[in-house]
Image: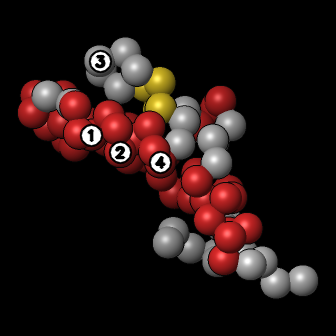
Amino acid sequence: MAETLEQEARRLLADVPKEYMFKSSSGHSLCNLKELGDELTTMSDENYVFHARSETAFSFIPDVTMGLCPQKGKVA
């Protein structure tokens, strides 16, 4: 059965499993897109640059998005 738009939104906005949580350099653990958005609005420029330049900062994204969107077969 096809997923409705509401079901897809709930799935994509849900908390990720603990092994995929992102820990910012400020010490905050982020486990969903809302927390990531909140963190980005309050993050210092220095912390942003640190994470943007870090290879590990974005290495989790394909794994997490593939886990959330396995039927797509690619990062959304």
First in sequence: mark 2 vs mark 3: 3
First in sequence: mark 4 vs mark 3: 3
- Find out whether the residues at labels 1 and 2 contact each other: C-beta distance under 8 Å: yes
Picture quadrant where residue 25 is located: top left
Q: Amino acid at mark 4?
A: Leu
User: What number of labels is visible?
Assistant: 4
- State the CA–CA distance, disc 4 to disc 1: 10 Å
Q: Position of residue 44 (x, y in %)?
A: 14, 28
Q: Amino acid at mark 2?
A: Gly
Picture residue at 56% right of the left edge, 73% below the top: 74
Question: Which SS class for mark 1?
Answer: helix
On the image, numbered disc 3 is attached to which residue? 26
Q: Amino acid at mark 3?
A: Ser
Q: In screen coordinates, is 73 left or right of 61?
A: right
- Checking the image for residue 37, the label placed there is 2
In the image as oriented, which residue stretches furthest toward the left?
45
On the image, numbered disc 4 is attached to which residue? 33
- State the CA–CA distance, disc 3 to disc 1: 11 Å
